[in-house]
Image (spheres, rainbow, N blue to C red):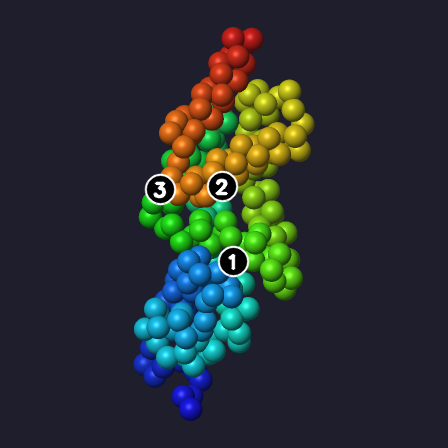
Amino acid sequence: MAKRGRPAGADSEQTKRKILDAARLEFAANGYDGTSITSIAGNAGIAPSAIYHYFQSKEKLYTEVFEQTSTAIWESVTPSKESRTLLESMRQLLVDSRLLADKLPSYSNFLAALPIEARLHPEFSDLLQKRADYQDKTFRQLAKIGIQSGELDFLTENEATELIRSIVMGWFFERHFRQAEIPNSGESILAMFEHLLNSRQRKK
């Protein structure tokens, strides 16, 4: 029986990254139930027993993939506090989202499948709240920008947050399930926010 543990001479962080990357690809393509430690190890180029040096179980590995993937995605699309208008921030969010979808498709595919996995596996139900927390940070920051700029000053912060969440996540899931972006969908979103900005400026 192979000994569990890190392969001799292997770089710990590099090996862990390889495992997480391989696991994300497997989970995104085959789901939690359709993924095995053996298949992950094969894609990572290590022995299955080596995975247990870093993760006690497939469940803990899935959770770690979620944390890493969520951090990478949401930190990439959260606007800076220096953004002056919601239109500017939304334009950058769409650009960043498209780049991530093209460069790292397994990231968005993994996150899109989480609600289904959480229904099938109650042990992951807490990840749905963490998912909402990641979203809240991004969408609330966008809401604050929109209210401060006047583009969404007719809404409360909570209302603006939920409006932006509905628009962005609707756009994301349609693109995900169709495996292609609806033509001009992103441009239509920007046109709406441009109209709000221009309306505000005309009132000044």
Residue 18 sits above or below residue 141 on the image: below
Label 1 and label 2: CA atoms lie apart by: 20 Å
The percent position of residue 135, horizontal first and vertical second, equals 56, 44
Classify residue 181 by image quadrant. top left
Q: Amino acid at mark 3?
A: Leu
Label 3 residue SS? helix
Classify residue 152 by image quadrant. top right
Q: Which mark is residue 173?
A: 2
The crowd level at tag 2 (other Cα within 10 Å; few <14, some 14-19, many 20+) is some
Quadrant placement of the C terminus: top right
Which-is-in-front pick, marks 3 and 2? 2
Q: Amino acid at mark 2?
A: Phe
Q: Amino acid at mark 1?
A: Glu
Which-is-in-front pick, marks 1 and 2? 2
Instruction: Write the residue at 59% across / 42% down.
Output: 136
Instruction: Write the residue at 42% across / 41% down.
Output: 178
Residue closer to the observer: 92 or 46: 46
Residue, disc 1: 67
Residue, disc 3: 99
